[in-house]
Every structure is written in C-alpha cells, then in structure tokens.
Amino acid sequence: MLMPTDSLVEILLVEDNPLDLELAQRALRKANLSNRIQVARDGEEALDYIFCEGPHAGRRIEETPKVVLLDLKLPKVDGLEVLRRIKGDPRTHGIPVVMLTSSREQNDLIESYALGVNSYIVKPVNFERFVEAVQGLGMYWLLLNQPPRLA
Amino acid sequence: MTPPYPVKISPEPSSESAEVGTRGPLPWLWRYRWRPYVLAVILTLGMLAVRVWAERGGPARPLLVLLIIPIVLSAHVGGRGPGLLATALAALGSNYFLLPPYFSLSLSDAADVLHWLALIAAGLIVSLLAGSRGRAIAPLGAPTTGTIERMLRAGFALALGCVGVVAVFSYGSLNRLHQSAEATRQSEALIAAVHTLVALVTDAETAQRGYALMGDPAYLEPYTEAQRRAESDLRELHVLAAASSPWQSGHARTLEQLVRQRLQTLSEAIEARRTGGLSAVQAAIAGGLGKAQHDLVRMRAQEMATAERGLLAERIEELQHSRLLTTGVIFGGSLLALAATAVSLFAFERDLAGRRRARAELQEANRLLESRVQERTEELARSHESVRRSEARMGGIVSSAMDAIISVDASQRIVLFNNAAERLFGCTSAEALGGSLDRFLPARFREQHRGHIESFGSTGETSRSMRSLGDLVARRSNGEEFPIEASISQIDVAGEKIYTVILRDVTERKRAEAAAAELAAIVESSYDAIVGKDLNGQVKTWNAGAERIFGYSAAEMVGSPISLVIPPERASDEREIMSRIRRGEAAEHFETVRRRKDGRLIDVSVTVSPIRDADGTIIGASKVARDISDQKEAQEALRDSEELFSAAFRFSPAGVAINRRRDLINLEVNDSFLRIFECQREEIVGHTLVDAGLLPPASVQRIREQLNAEGAVQIEELEARTRAGRQIFVRLSTKVVQLRGEACSISIVLDVTARRRADEERGKLARLVEHSNDFIGIAELDGRVTFLNPGGRRMIGFADGADPRQLLFTDYVPLEWRDFFLQVAIPTVREKGLWEGEMQLRHLETGELLDVFRTAFLLRDGDGEPQYLATVTRDITERKRTEAQLREKEAQLHATDRRLAEIVQGMSESVFALDADWRFTFVNDRGEMLLRRRREALLGRRLWDEFPHIVGTPTEANYRQAMEKRVPVAFETYSVLAQLWLDIRIYPSGDGVAAFALDISTRKAAEERIHRLNADLEERVKARTIELEAANKELESFSYSVSHDLRGPLRAMDGFSRATAEEFGSLLPSEGQRYLQIIRDSAGQMGALIDDLLNFSRLSRQPLARREVDTSSLVGDIVRDQLSHAPDRTIDLRVGPLPACEGDPALLRQVWVNLLSNAIKYTRHQSPAVIEVGTRTEGRATVFFVRDNGAGFDMRYAGKLFGVFQRLHRAEDYEGTGVGLAIVQRIVHRHGGEVWAESAVGRGATFFFTLKDAHAD
C-alpha cells in the first residue's frame, strides 16, 4: 500500500481490529480519501505518530492530520487516554477527533465529550451504514470543516 | 481697650469684568462670530495650495504634517469650531478630495490611511483642547490653574505616549526587518548552492564522458574536483535547507541521494572504462541510467530553486509591508506627539500670560492701598500730637498732686486716675481707666455713693467736702478697706458732667486714735493697780485696779503722794526706786509690802518704769502693782499637801509609779510597786516599764493612746509580768499630771492576780454546770430551789429565764416517788451527806415521767455546817426505753426471723442481707453456695473484708448506691468467685440492704450466641454485598465487552458479505446472492439482539430519575414517530385522554415505544389496523392500556410473554428479538407498577400497565 508522505496525511485512522480496519479503508477508498490515510494499530502508535516520537521522530508536530478517527478500545493505550493526551496538549488540541466505536456505553460517551471529543459515532453492524458514516465523516472533516489555522 | 477702627473692605472693581464676554485671543475677531471660520478656511486652503506646490515633483507624504499648522492656528484663534472646520478641510484636502484631482479620495496603502487618521486625530485633539481652554478662561477672566495643569499634563502625557508607542513599534519592526533580511540572504545562498551542485554534477558528467571517449585520465580532473567539492556543497545545502523550511530539508535529502547516485553511476562508468575499455562503458552509458539520474538531479534542483524563489518573493513582500507599516506608525505617532506638544505649549503660554497680567494688577492694587494707609497714618499722628500736648499739661498737675484724684463721667466711668490714686488703691491707672468707680467702694456703699453723686450733680454746686456724709470708707484693689476723707467737684466738659473726687487716706490717723483709746481702756480695766506718778512721788493717774487693791479711790489719790500706801518701814524702798527711775532704769517684779486704806498690809509684786515725754525726758514713773497675798497662802497650803501626798505615796498598799510621758521613763515608784513587780528600785527608776519587761509594748501603746485621748485610763485587768517573768494581773489607774512643767503620768497598780485566778476557776465550773445536760440544782435545806442549770430546766420543762426560787424540789418529783424522796433520799443526804439512786422525775409541762439517776449531796459552809442541798441528776429515760425496745425487738425478730428464714432459705435465689456497717446479717442456703462460705463464717463479718475483690468494681458502686440513696438497684455481673453470670438486685432493708442474686448464666450464653450470630450475619451480608458489587462490576464489564466485541465480527460478516456482493456479485448465481443476503440479515438481527440485551441489562443498573411526565405529549410524540416509520400502512390510532404520571421520562418513553411498535407490528395483516391508547381507573391506580386488533396470542402462553427471548410468534411471521416486552416489564416493575396482557388468537391483544401512584404510600 502506498504510504503517504508525512505532510500529506489528512486522516489518522486508529483501529486495532484488522477487519474493521479493512472495511474502513475500503469505505474511505470508495470516497476517494484513501491516499491520505495514516493507520495506527494501537494507542501507542497513534500517540507516537501525533507527538512525533519513536518511529515518527522525524515528523514535524505542526503538520497535524486533519482528522483522527479513533477506536475506543485499543491495545496498550486505550482510546480515551489517546483522546486525553491529544486534547491536553496545546500543540495538538486543535486536531478534530472522532470517536469511532462499537460501544454504546453512556459512560464512554460522557467521558469522551468531557475530554473534548469533536464527534462520536457508534459503528453500526450494518456495513452500508458504516460506509455512509465513515464517508460522511471523511467528507465532513476533510472538505467541509475548516480547522483553525495553527500559527 | 481702644475699640478697633471699623475696617472697610470694599472689593476693587475689576477692570477685567467688562471683558468677560471675550472668549479668546485677538478679541477683534470675536466681534463677528463668523470671522474665525473664514480665517480657518483661508489658512487651510492656503496650506493645501502650498502642499500641492511642494508635491509637484511627486507625492511626498511627510508634507501632510504642514496641514497641522492651519488647524492649530485656527483652533488657537477661534476655538473649537474653526479648529474642527480646519481639520475637516485638511482631511478632505490632503488626499485630493478637494484639490485636483477632485473627488478622488485616494488611500493607496495602510501607511496612507494611518497618516490620514493621525492627521484627523491630531486636528480633533487640538480643536477640542482649544475649545475647552476657551471655556476655562472665559468665566473667570484668568485661566484656572487646575484646568491648565490638567491640560498640560494630558498634552505632555499624550505626546510621551505617542513617542513611546513609536519607539516600541520601531524597535519591533527593525528586528523584523533584520530577520527578513537574514532570511532573504539565506534563500539566495540556497539557490546559489543548488545551482552550484547542479553545475558540479554536470562538470562530473562532462568529465566522465570525456574520459569514456578518450580514455585519457586528464579528462577526469573536473570529475575528481566535483567529487571533492560535492561533499562540502551538500553539507552547506543541508544547513541552508534546514534553515529555510522542512519541505526544503526533505528535498535537500532527496537531492543529496540523487547526486550521490549520480556520482556513483559516474564512478562505475569510469571504472568500467578503466577495466573494460570503451565498449564496456558504452554499454553502461547506453543503459540510459545516467541520463535519467542527471535529469532527476536537475529537476529536483529546479524544484528547490523555484520553491526558494517563491519563498524569497514572499519574504520580500512581507518586508515591504513591514517597512510601510513602520513608516506609517513612526510618522503618525510623531504627528500626534507634535500636536499634543503644540497644544500643551499653547496652553502653557496662555497660562503664563494670564499670570503676568494678574501679578501686574495685584501690584497696582497694593500700591494704591499703601498710599491710602500712608495718608491715614499721617492724619492720625497729627491729631494724636495735639491731644498728647494738652494731656501732658494736665497730667503734670494731676500726677504730682499728693492726694488721689479720680474723675468719673456721668455714667461713673473713671476717666482720670492719678499717681497718688494708684498708690492709694494699689491699682494702676491703666487698670482703673474706663472701669467703674464701684471697684474702689465697699459693696455696701455703692448704691449710696451713686445716689450722692447724682444728688450732687443735680445741685449744680461746683465743689463740696464729703465729710458731712460721715466716715467714708474706700476699698483697695486687694479688697482691704480703709477710711478716707474726700471732696468732690463737677465740671461740664462738652455737655458731659465730669466729677472729680480728691481723696486722702486717713487710716494712720484713725489707727492712732484707736490705739490711744484702747490703751486707756486697758489701763482702766486692768486687774493690776496701774499708777502714774511724777518724779516727786505725786500720783497722776489711779486706775480701777489701784482702787480695788489699795482701797483708795482715784479721786482720793490723784494729786496725793504715793507714800500714803507705803508702810513707813518700806519708805527707803520707794526712795531707791525713784532714784533708779531718775537714772532711766526700771524696777521689775520686786516683792514688797504695801498698806491698804483699811490699814491691812498686803504683799504686792511691783514693777516700776520711767515715763518719758516726747523729747525723751523722764517726767515720772508708772507703777504696776499686783496683790500677791493669796499666792503666798497657796504656797503654804501646797507645802502641807505635798507632805501628805508623799506619805500616801510611800505607804500606799497599791503600787504607784510616776513616769515622764515624753519618754515613758519612770521617775519614781513606791515600795508597793516594787513588791508587786518583785524588783529593785534601781531596776525600774530610770527605765521604762517595757524595758524592764513588766508590760508588753502593745499594752503600753494602748494606754498611751487612751491617755492622749482622755487624759486618764482605768484598766480592770492588765496582764503584766514580774521582773522574774511570772504572769500577774494588775488593776491599773493612770492619769496625766503636770510635774515641774513636764507632762507626766501617775499610775496606781493593784495586784489582782489571785482574784483573777479565782474568777477563772469559778468561770470554768460555771460553764461546766451551764453546759452540762445533767440536771444540776441547789436548794435550801427546806427544799426551796435556789439554782437550776439549763440542763435541769430542759429536763423538767422549766423556762430558761424563770426564777428557780418559785420551785420546791418536790414539785418535779412525781407523787408516787415523793414519799421515797422525802423519807428515804433526803434524810440519807442529811445524815450521810450523799444519796445516789434511780428514781423518776415529772416533766412540769407535759407531766411525762422521766427515769433518772440522781446524786444528792450536802453543801456545807466554812464551818462545816450544812447549808444547801445539791443534786446532779441524769436522764436515763432514753436508755431505759432503748433497753425495753431492744428486748421487744429481739423477741419479734426471733419470731419473724424464723418465718423469713424458712421462706428465704428455700428460695432459688441466693439471698443475703447486710447491715449499715456492711456486716452480713443473713445468708440463705443458696447464698452460702454462691458465696462459697458457711453462714457461720459470714455473719457479723464485713462484706468488703470477706470479698475484697469487689472493692473498686461497678458492683461496689451499685451496693453503695442502694445503701446510701436507699433505692433498689439491679444489675448483671459476672461473678469471678462463682464463675457465673448473676442478675443481682439490691434492696434497702431496714438500715442495711438485702441482696438477691439469680444465676443467669444460661440466658447470658444464649444472648452471647445471638450476638455472635448477628455479628456473623452482618459480616456475611457485608461479604455478600462486596461479592455482589464485584459481580455487578464484572457484569458491567461483560456487557461492555459484549457491546464492543460481539459486534465486531458481525460488522465483518455484514461488511465482507456486502463487499463480496459488490465486487463479485456478477460471478455469483442468484442463490449465492440470496445466501449472502441471509448472512447479512442474520448479522443485522444479531446486532439488534445485542443492542436490546444491553438495553435490558442497563435498565437494572440505571437509577430512576423520577419526575412529572406529561403522558399525553409523550405518547403523541411516539405515535407520530412510529407512524412515520410505516407510511404505507392504514392505521386507525386513537389516543384517549392520558393523565400525567410520575416516572423516569426516558424509561417511560421506552415502554410506550415498545408497546406501540408491537401493536403496529402485530396488526400488519389487518386493514384497517385499529390501535387504541387509553386509561381506566382501578381502585386508586390509573391503568394505561394499548389495545390492537392484530394477531393476538394464546392466553395459555401469557406467562411467557414478558420473559427475555420469549416469543409467541415465528420470526418469519413477525420479526423481533423477544426482548421488547421484557424491557417493558422491567421498567414497569422498577416503577413499582404491574404489567399484564389480555388476548385471544386472531382477536387482537391489550397490554395494561400501572405505575406506582406517588401518593399511594
């Protein structure tokens, strides 16, 4: 798969389930958004990418992805922690984060919003609706929503 | 005293007041209000013209500053209006709105706008400040310093602020300029470096080609040079790219890679040529790799250069912007600062001018005032001089007069007071002048005096002596009164009467007269004979005393010779006296004998002194004679008395001491005194009694004080000590006497020690008798009672104060004892002197009989003759009664004891009794067992001694409480002794307590068991709760996992089925596609199941949020929503009135949704479907129902209806998860309500539910 150069990443997709990952990528591909996706398979990878640590040490933190699609349940560092770190850092708190999860738990929802999540979408079982949701998301955050320009 | 001249303060008419209307400089301009405006227009247009002329070579922005000049001038001259007009004109004219090209307000860039705005702002500030200055000046005619100061301060602050802003801004933009310039330089360097690199590569390539063709190593030199330089160039390129941007940095890396590759390729080709010859290198070059690499290098280099140029252009543009902005700010700020400074200077200048004018005016006013003062001073000096001269003339006369001269005006104020008056009244003229004459008159004469003056004034006489008014008295200022002689005169001065009194002090004269009169009176009234005689012995004066002493009257003696009273034998005396008188000497107090007229000789004491005339010549003698015959007799008497006294002193049995009061030293004591105090004379005389150790100092002090106060002291008993230290008591009488002119005291001392001892003994005995409770009495031998002590009186009821003599000793002996008393007891006493025995007495009042033990005996006189009968009688009634009671009680006790003992012995409780002293008085059999002691070992023993282990325990406290408070006490305790739990009850019994103890060990054990069980149970409940909580947590996390993880595979199933259908659908037969659809449907259904299950489990976890719910609107919402999901159905949905209810709105919504969606689902095959929603009331509960005419169900299965996953229909007929109704039931139950259904197959179903009525409980 073609890895986008760092500066062109528009979507950071954080997903541990390979099947969900493939489906999400397929959906995004169908919406012609696939060439600007960076995938992280767990919370740690996601944080490394966003904060330019570990394998991403050379990346410039100013070049933020335009949206982060974040699964809630993740190995190593869970989604809420990733969200807390992104929203707690002045350099990254402007990145829009969308929780994409199969959990319908009220607590998760409440805590996500308390931490400043920008949107929260429950993954539907029905794939068509999943595709619609993912595509809608991608379009919204990439094309419609103008993130605040970082100085 | 001089009244102050009235000071006229008239405000100077201000010359400025006429000009109050003037409102600024150049007053002529103000005559017509429009003139300043015209001036403003002309000035501004003129300056615009100058500017157009100055800018003919091109726009020169700084000339804009010129326009501030007409604004400032206009504002200065005309104030706010013209200033604003000039500002407006300048603003419009500055950018070609008014001047050619007309109406083309051109603000080309930010700096232009800034300049323009600065000009307007400066104009506004100048105009407004000028206007406010005009207002501040106008009403006062001079600038108000405060306003001016404020303006100055504001102006300079503004200027300073502007300069500060400009400075800060300039510094910032200079920094930015510097940075931009640096960045620009680096960009250029980067572009150059890229180009150099490309050139190097090209050089290397050319060299390689040359070598390849020719094989001559000389061609390789550019190549090796390029290789060498490439390293350093690349390093530099990296540094520059990193400084430029990350993007450039990335490109630099790529470029480096490409260059290296290219150089590698070149070296390989060269190596091929070197080893393989031309053909080999041709083959290598023909591969085209080199060219492609070269193109890539060039392309990348080009990209970098282009990007950097773009960046460069951006930076230059930024630089321009920044420069423009800086210029603008500096220029605008300077303009503002200039304007503010100008305004401030204007204001300052105005202020100075105002001050100068004010100062000049002040000086002028001062000068005028001074000249007026000068004139008035001169005038005063002239009048003062003339007055002074006339006064000097008068003053000379008056002050030199010997008599006091005082003038008063008609209102009696003093207007003249001369030196003599000052001396006389002791008061300076300054004090007296202007005051009233009254102060020099005694208060009692003031009215009178005023009357005299007035009457004198009315007579019109010019002068009069005031002697006719009797003795006149005046008063000095120190209050002393003195006699005066005065005359008064009056003159008319300018229609005002002035009275002048001339007075003279006649005190001395009066005094002399008085002294003479007094002397005469003394002589006359003297008791002594005072006789004046001339040198020849002829009597000149003979006073009353002389008449009395000598018997001759004054008439007889005056003119007769003094020798008449001198016995012939004393004639020589007289001669000698006279010769001494002639010598001018006096003869004092010589005693001699004279003869009275009746011939009796009298002793006289005579003093003769010479009498001199005014010239000091002795002209006679005065003789004062005193009769001393009586005195002589008295001296004789005294001598006799002294002798008597001396004898009394010496032989008195009482001790007598005389001591000096001054130091208390004993002057004399008699023998008795020495005997009493057992000492020698020399030990006492010459010492004080305290020193001699006879009296304590405190007593002496007391005596002394009393002597001082009363002159005499009488002490009945005074404690003293003999010289040997023995305590004695003396009676002391002391009196103050004068002995040889010295205060002494004489003390008489009697030894009363023996009497005192006897008194003491008697007192003790008397007290004994007094306080004895026994009957102690004394009677005459015939039986008449003479004494009865209080104890006896109490015993027989005889009043305390009553006289015992009214009693006979038989009065209180009862009749039955009288014979015995009179015939046995009394005779025994008479015979043997004593009788003792028990008998009875009778209480006099109550008649009660008393048992007594009586002792009767005889009291004899000194000769041993019986004199009185005495008795000591003791009341033994109580003792007798107690003895009887005791005997009776003993008998009773024996009886009850036996009965009680029988009962108590048989009791199952342990019983024992204790007396007030905690001694065991009873112990029953059980008690013996409990106390582990035989009865015999306990009775009479103290509880605390026998069982010391309970001392200090609560048990002891309980025993004591029962004993002391006399209340029953019950308590439970564990007896260590008996190893038992005991229920002990202690009752007060008699004067002790009784204790009942019951063994309750069995009950205690049971209680203990229950207690332990309870504790255990609680422990178990706690553990169970913790377990449950853990289970709940687990369940929650399980639900969470289910929610998250179970849906993942489902999503995959659905997603990949769909992907398969989409991408490979054309390859699948229709059956295959149907299977895929089935997979997807199943996955969907399972998803729904999971959701429902989660909802269901969450229901029991969520707390209820009860509140008032508007059922009508809730159901209305849901109905609308549900109908919109089934647009193709014909549904007759009737909603009746629904009362509000109490509950969790979200959960109730779920109930209604589930019931209504069920109704819609199960009426799918009915047309029309009829659904009815309503309520009915059952008892106090409101029952909601949803009725449909759908498929219904068999009531046999109604029990399963609300179970989870329980379905009464096949899934292919009616889809569903079988959870909906379970959720309904769970929610209704959680609300404390009930849900049920009624139905029949094919005839519809009705679901009812109730909610707990909030008011039901």
Image (cartoon, rainbow, N blue to C red):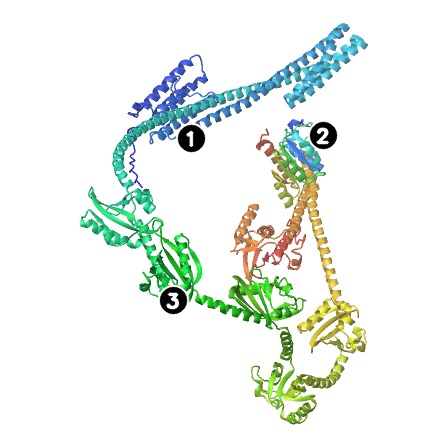
**Residue at disc 2, secondary structure:** helix
Q: Tell me the SS state at disc 1.
A: helix
What is the x, y in percent for residue B642? 53, 68
Q: CA distance from mark 3 to mark 1?
A: 122 Å
Amino acid carrying mark 1 in the image? Arg
What kind of residue is marked 3? Arg
Q: Give residue B1006's quadrant in the image.
A: bottom right
**Residue B13 appears in view:** no
Q: Can residue B1089 be seen at all in this image of the molecule? A: yes
Extreme residue toward the left, this view = B460
In the rendered image, which quarter contains the C terminus of chain B?
A: bottom right
Residue B198: image location, x then y, percent? 68, 13
Dot placed on the residue nearer the N-terminal end, 3 or 1: 1
Assign the N terminus of chain B to one quadrant of the image.
top left
In the rendered image, which residue does mark 3 sit on? Answer: B596
Q: Which residue is mark 2?
A: A55
Is the Cβ of the residue at disc 2 closer than 8 Å to that at disc 3?
no
Question: Mark 1 = which residue?
Answer: B150
Q: Quadrant of residue B253?
A: top right
Tell me where residue B998 sits by quadrant. bottom right
